[in-house]
Amino acid sequence: MNQPTLLADPAAIEIDAYIPNSDSITIRVYATQAKAFCPSCAQPSSSLKSRYVRSLADLPWHGVAVGLELHTRKFRCRNDVCHRKVFCERLPQVAASYARRTVRLKEVTALLGFALGGRAGSRAAVKLKLSASKDTVLRLIRLSAVRQTTEDKSPVKILGVDDFAFKRGERYGTILVDLEKHQPIDLLPDRKSGSLQAWLAIHPAVKIISRDRASAYATGARLGAPDAVQIADRFHLLKNLLDGFEKFLSRQQPALLKASQTVFHPLDVDGVFKQSVEQVSSPTIAQNLVIGQKKAQLREREQRFKVVKKLHRAEVPVLTIARRLRMSRNTVKKFIASDSFPMRRQNTPRFSPIHRFLPHLRQRWAEGERSSRALWQEIRAQGYPGAEVTLRHFMQKWRVATAAEVEAHAVTKASPGRSPSVRQVKWLLFSPEKRKRKWEQQFADELCRQSTEIDAAQKLVTKFHTMLSDRQPGQLQHWLERARDSGIGEFVWFANGVEQDRKAVEAAFEQEWNQGQVEGNVNRLKLLKRQMYGRAKFDLLRARVLHQG
């Protein structure tokens, strides 16, 4: 019974019989080509010499393994000058020479490998009755990658370049993306300028190169494609400026503290609301222990700050300092950028609606009322907007504490919020639309009022953002002059960097291309790298990244 739809190449083979087994099905098929072509001289031949049988694994059917019993033939080559006298019949749509699985089974197995990797792909293949080991899966991935590399591809005109980490802080590679086709086209084993230069030399069709602010990529692009237009990514430009702005704010701790005191502690002047240390008349042993631990931690952190400064003056690299002191690189960089020891953000007292009803609650508590439900109903009638559970949690302290501790708890835990961190201050100054609460607007205004330097820095940042959003390259020169005249080290450094990369920055204002899709491909690469647990070689990672299923 002939059913061509079940066959890989109905024009070359036909079904003769189905042979059921205990756990599989064998399909007997015969080759039906009238003639075959010699693989050496490509001359057709119909001179049959003999027949032979090949056993091939094929795609499963309804979860049952399927095998092909392929009856094929050998032919005589009638070309007198050909060195090959006898050749086997080729069936390229069915199976490759010497293969033990069909072409379509090979492609499906490779697809599992590209999607899942070696071990995971092998486990999935076994469940699907494809029967492939992890080594087979990896071999098929590499064979498919070689075939993709040798295939002719259309030239790349608009290129996106970015780096990725093999091991963060130590070893990096480069990903190249065709921005027109929205797909990665190659990986480089490092992020050196020479590697990019060599790649561009063999791809002369590149006309536009989008990149981040890395100097290595700028040099490689300039040497490898001198006529190409380089575009500095707008996101990285703004990020570099905001990073400098944050470093500048981290050096303005006195101004931040003064603005915080003005906005968050207005009642301290009238004596209505004091710090918890003044409220607690007899601190408990536990409180003294906590205070002692915090002081010890502060002394240890201050000592680390001094050691970091000393090592930095000795020109020890940041990564070496971080490893030697077992600190994060960000903390080391923060210490290096700070002129004085950066104090950590302290929790400030917060107000709560319960605070207004404390006299009534104390009176009812003294009268013996212990039901939080009853007390909540009483103060709710007086205008308390909170939930019963909030009052219940608040009064839990009263059940286990003395009257003095209750008073301290009422004052220190009832709150309007904490003093904002440097990062929060950065976003409050940079994005006025984020100031959704009254204190945020008050804090930003107070900070700019008290410090003319912070006010100038905030105006520079917002002006640059406006220029970048509205594409105003004509105002760039004036902004650079203002940044240098400000005397703020971080802004002077940023302006000098922009001047060195002036053409690429101006192109960022004018061109539409950016690094968005490149960053998306880097994110996909990270996922693939983590699936392989960092044990796969570069060629396998490259094959999986470049594969377009």
Image (cartoon, grey):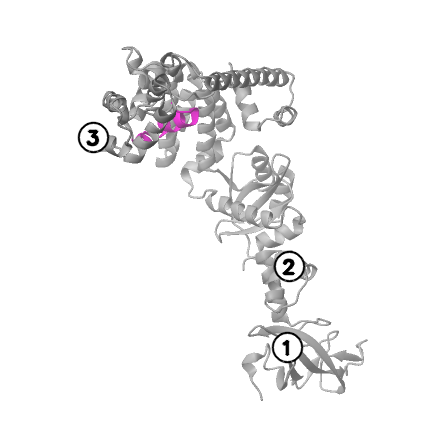
Name the residue located 38 percent from the left edge and 22 percent from the top edge. Answer: 401
Q: Amino acid at mark 1?
A: Ser
- Residue 111, quarter of picture: bottom right
In the image, the segment drawn in magenta is 419-436
Which of the marked residues, 1 or 3, is nearer the chain's N terminus? 1
Which residue is pictured at 32% across the width and 24% down the height? 416
Instruction: Give residue 64's position: percent from left, percent from top.
Output: 60, 74
**Residue 362 picture location, percent across and down:** 27, 21
Q: Are marks 1 and 3 in contact (CB under 8 Å)?
A: no
The answer for how far apart the CA atoms under marks 1 and 2 are is 27 Å
CB under 8 Å between callouts 2 and 3?
Answer: no
Q: What's the magenta bit mostly, secondary-structure-wise?
A: helix
As displayed, is residue 548 above or below residue 366? below
Q: Which disc, if any, is residue 256? A: none
Q: As drawn, is 20 to the left or to the right of 254?
A: right
Q: Residue 378: which disc?
A: 3
Dot 2: few (<14), some (14–19), or many (≥20) neighbours within 10 Å? many
Q: Residue at x 33, y 23 (%)?
A: 350
Using the numbered discs, state the Cα–Cα distance from disc 1 to disc 3 in whole angstroms. 78 Å
Check disc 2 and report the residue beneath it.
141
Mark 1 residue crowding within 10 angstroms, few (<14) / some (14–19) / many (20+): some
Residue 291 relative to residue 142: left or right: left
Residue, disc 1: 24
Q: Is residue 544 above or below residue 247?
A: below
In this orientation, does residue 159 appear?
A: no
